[in-house]
Image (cartoon, grey):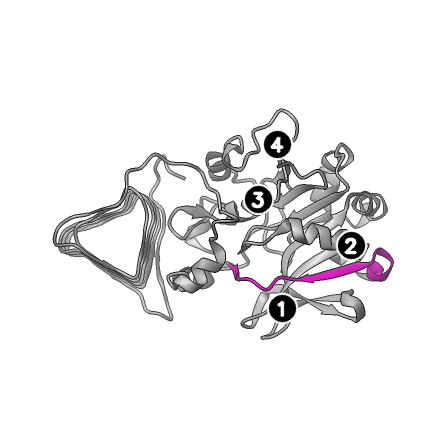
């Protein structure tokens, strides 16, 4: 099924405001999550599941890990002769503006993507708030509303200063956007649908304000453009720094929460890897954990997330931790409340321990894997 109504546009060239050893050699969009996925998988999968077969991806400067992961876009049905995946140049604007995901300068630079499209709508999405939604239904609701823009929001489960919230008036029309949100506010999910002609009009009229975020530029014209809202009632997970990355990942050990993100009718797709199933050797013990293919478990794993190819040797213990690809936890080592990035070897009888309030983070060791 090919969606004839919309094309996609995903931004991946923005950074977290908080510095992190996890982001020294990769952009936020390619951060591994839940063992086998990366953040970029979720917006790509949402678009793939809606039949969108033309997607522009705005690239960061340190794009190597994204290219390695998405390749030609085959795993999301984007390796096509007509349409497909377009890797777009992005401007480096770093962490200077909180909540800036849709830099007008990027949109203007890549205007040919929109001018050459035949579809009437554009689905625009960032990549560090992940969710699984039915874009088909939202596009239909957008068409029915007659609005120029439909912004997708979620009732905030907790206060968050790194997101934006919507002020919604009569008829679900958005009247303003503010920085940050409190419990119960209308949290903007950095995902919206815009009429292609409206977007081209914005490109033409706001070129002199290209240093602003799209919604900063049009803030005074919400009524004229007719900005509508759509409430998403499923699970949304925002990753903004090391703490939110760890906390939201650990919450997904709860099957009820994980089931809201991973569902058979709308699968989350990722790069295919040829790894054998995880192996649990006699005498090993694992509970309440997500353990990926290719892992070898000889020791103990509790309440943890292990990416593919991790080895936990006999007598080693991993608890309340995230262990990324190709790490080795040597015999007698103990890892607790930690994030261990790729290719690390935790030496025999070593203890690496953080606390629930202060997670220990060990950076990636240089290697082929990104």
Residue 337: percent from the left, percent from the top?
31, 64
The CA span between labels 2 and 4 is 27 Å
Report the magenta residues as a range. Answer: 220-238
Query: Which dot, 4 or 1, sits closer to the camera?
Result: 4
The reply, left or right, for residue 195 in relation to residue 47 is right
Residue picked out by circle 1: 180
Q: Which residue appears farthest toward the bottom when viewing the image?
A: 183
Tag 4 and tag 1, C-beta contact below 8 Å: no
- Check whether the beta carbons of the residues at disc 2 and disc 4 lie within 8 A of each other: no
Query: Quick check: marks 2 and 3 in contact, CB under 8 Å?
Result: no
Given this view, does label 1 or label 2 mark the residue nearer the observer? 2
Q: From the image, tell me which residue sits under label 2.
A: 144
Image quadrant occupied by the C terminus: top left
Please tell me whether residue 18 belongs to the stretch shown in magenta: no
Residue sitting nearer the eye, 15 or 218: 218
In percent of width and height, residue 174 lies at 76, 64
Earlier sequence position, callout 2 versus callout 3? 3
In this view of the protein, which residue sits in the foreground, 14 or 43? 43
Give the number of the disc on residue 84. 4
Which residue is pictured at 35% across the width and 40% down the height? 366
2 or 4: mark nearer the eye: 2
**Precedes in sequence: disc 1 or disc 3:** 3
Whether the magenta-drawn stretch holds residue 236 is answered as yes
| Residue annotated with mark 3 | 49
Determine the secondary structure under disc 1: strand
* Nearest-to-viewer mark from 4 and 3: 3
**Which badge, 1 or 2, is on the more N-terminal residue?**
2
Mark 3 element type: helix
């Amino acid at each position: 099924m090919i969606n004839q109504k919309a094309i996609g546009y995903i931004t991946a060239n923005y950074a977290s405001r908080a510095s992190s050893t996890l982001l020294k050699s990769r952009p936020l969009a390619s951060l591994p999550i839940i063992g086998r996925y990366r953040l970029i998988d979720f917006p790509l999968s949402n678009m793939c599941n809606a039949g969108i077969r033309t997607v522009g991806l705005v690239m960061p400067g340190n794009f190597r890990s994204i290219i390695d992961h998405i390749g030609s876009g085959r795993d999301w049905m984007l390796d096509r002769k007509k349409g497909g995946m377009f890797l777009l140049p992005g401007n480096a604007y770093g962490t200077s503006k909180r909540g800036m995901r849709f830099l007008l300068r990027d949109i203007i630079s890549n205007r040919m993507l929109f001018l050459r499209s035949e579809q009437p709508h554009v689905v625009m999405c960032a990549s560090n708030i992940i969710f699984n939604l039915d874009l088909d239904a939202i596009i239909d609701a957008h068409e029915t509303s007659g609005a120029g823009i439909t912004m997708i929001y979620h009732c905030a489960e907790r206060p968050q200063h790194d997101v934006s919230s919507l002020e919604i008036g009569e008829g679900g029309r958005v009247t303003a956007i503010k920085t940050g949100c409190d419990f119960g506010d209308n949290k903007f999910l950095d995902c919206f649908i815009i009429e292609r002609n409206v977007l081209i009009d914005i490109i033409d009229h706001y070129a002199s304000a290209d240093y602003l975020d799209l919604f900063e530029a049009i803030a005074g014209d919400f009524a004229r453009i007719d900005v509508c809202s759509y409430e998403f009632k499923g699970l949304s997970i925002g990753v903004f720094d090391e703490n939110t990355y760890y906390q939201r990942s650990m919450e997904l050990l709860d099957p009820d929460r994980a089931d809201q993100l991973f569902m058979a009718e709308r699968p989350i797709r990722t790069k295919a890897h040829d790894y054998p199933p995880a192996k649990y050797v006699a005498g090993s013990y694992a509970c309440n954990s997500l353990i990926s293919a290719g892992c070898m478990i000889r020791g103990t794993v509790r309440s943890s997330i292990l990416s593919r190819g991790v080895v936990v040797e006999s007598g080693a213990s991993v608890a309340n931790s995230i262990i990324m690809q190709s790490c080795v936890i040597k015999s007698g080592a103990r890892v607790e409340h930690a994030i261990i990035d790729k290719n690390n070897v935790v030496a025999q009888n070593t203890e690496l321990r953080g606390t629930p309030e202060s997670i220990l983070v060990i950076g990636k060791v240089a290697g082929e894997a990104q």
